[in-house]
Amino acid sequence: MRIIAGRHRGRVLTSPTWPGLRPTSDRLRETLFNILAARVPGARVLDVCAGTGAVALEALSRGAASAQCIESNRRAQALIATNRDALGEDARCMIVPGDALRVLQGALTGGPFDVIFLDPPYDIAALDELVDAASRHLAPEGMLVVEHASRRASPLRNGHPPTRTVRAGDSTLAFYS
């Protein structure tokens, strides 16, 4: 896993050494950021179910103003901190520990967010509820992106389907504006 573009281009990120964490692949992150390119500079980014923090750190490398990573797994939180600190982004990247749905149902500092990326476990039952909770923190002209299993239908946001989907193998990116 590496940072694909921007200030930290080519820097290698530490990957998880345990099962159960599914980082967004370099290829899928490249597709994501090619689509979001114009939205990232100066953006406030929220990475939900952040895992390694790769999406948040890629956004910072490409000029985002700040990033917050919501993550419930303590080992993953430590991994995000390791990757963040290795890139010298500790001042612009905050880790918010806790269950994603509970955190999103509360107040978050640093928002509203211009880009929100959700990458929950592919078997999560309450995906629509998680998307709706995240939407509460989206800036008026912001973009919400959900990575989900291609075998599943894209979740609804407040009852509405995504404005765009991009399939890449087992994963699909669903975009909501």
Image (cartoon, rainbow, N blue to C red):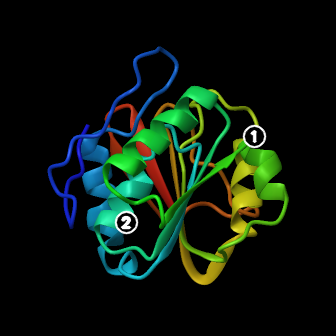
The residue carrying mark 2 is 60
* Mark 1, residue position: 99
Residue most extreme to the top: 19
Q: Amino acid at mark 1?
A: Asp
Q: Secondary structure at mark 1?
A: loop
Q: Residue at x 23, y 43 (%)?
A: 2
Percent coordinates x, y for residue 120 in the rendering: 59, 39
Residue 36 vs 166, above or below: the answer is below
Q: Is residue 92 above or below residue 11?
A: below
Q: Amino acid at mark 2?
A: Leu
What kind of element bears circle 2?
helix
Which quadrant of the structure image shows residue 64? bottom left
Compare residues 150 and 63 and report the one nearer the observer: 63
Residue at 37% over, 66% down: 60
Q: Quadrant of the C terminus?
A: bottom right
Q: Quadrant of the N terminus?
A: top left
